[in-house]
Image (spheres, rainbow, N blue to C red):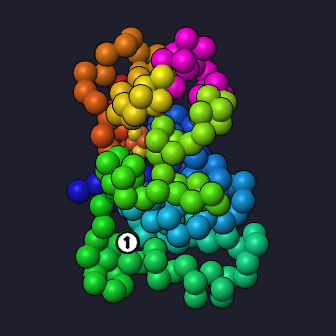
Amino acid sequence: DSKGAIHKEQLDELACTSYPPCMKEIHNSLRRNHHLRYGARRQYGQFLKEAGLPMEEQLQFLKEEFTKKIDSDKFDRQYGYDIRYIYGKEGRRAEMSGMACATIILKSQPGPLDCHGCPFAHMETALLTQRLKNCDISDVEVENIVGFSKTRQYDRACTRYFEAVHKMEDGALGQMITHPNQYLKLSQEIYAG
Ligand code: SF4
């Protein structure tokens, strides 16, 4: 159990250093647009819960952004329930875990206005390439990763991305990324030394 393992003040830094591309995309979209649609709130919310962000902090974190555009009452009415639901405090009262890559890729197809999903599976090649180039990854590596994405080897694309941003040799991770929370945890371990 990793409850309380992370706090909302750390999220910008973690997004930069330790988030997989799927969660980075949602986090940045939230900061930019002060809103997230349902699919993104679910995907990111479950990830943050599993990462150990306490419920009250997730509520505050989203509220701080959303209330740049809507008032606080409206936030509580429209979005509070879904966040509490993830933590097992509403509805069927079961705590939810983070979605695995397979679920995100196969069961959570984003629409044109959505920012959730898996960038390796769902993002246009040109935009994916641009995002990867912003990550301090060499052009050769970007090509490799985009190549894996094009041939639908999303786990290899994400694993190679992990190695590239952590300045590791090809294959040095020694395991495949199959879950965004696994990605986060492995990255946190690297930075914790
Ligand atoms: Fe996220 Fe998994 Fe896609 Fe990586 S492969 S970006 S962890 S959904």
- Of the pair 139 and 164, the residue shown nearer to us: 139
Q: Is residue 62 above or below residue 138?
A: below
Picture coordinates of residue 102 (x, y %)?
32, 48
- Of the pair 176 and 11, the residue shown nearer to us: 176
Picture coordinates of residue 30 (x, y %)?
64, 58
Label 1 sits on what residue type? Answer: Ile
Picture coordinates of residue 178 (x, y %)?
30, 40
Q: At x 55% / y 79%, what residue is drawn?
A: 79
For residue 169, say whether it is visible.
yes
Task: Specify the quadrant of the image occupied by residue 179.
Answer: top left
Q: Is residue 37 left or right of residue 166?
A: right
Badge 1: residue crowd in 10 Å (few <14, some 14–19, many ≥20): many
Q: At x 26% / y 76%, what residue is drawn?
A: 94
- Of the pair 75 and 8, the residue shown nearer to us: 75
* Element marked by disc 1: helix
For residue 4, say whether it is visible.
no
User: Is residue 136 covered in magenta?
Assistant: yes
Q: Main secondary structure of the magenta part?
A: helix
Task: Specify the quadrant of the image occupied by residue 192.
Answer: top left
Numbered range of the magenta stretch? 131-146
Q: Is mark 1 within 8 Å of ligand 1?
A: no
Quarter of the render that holds ligand 1: top left
User: Is residue 137 covered in magenta?
Assistant: yes
Which quarter shows the C terminus? top left
Q: Is residue 70 above or below residue 2?
A: below
Q: Mark 1 — residue?
A: 86
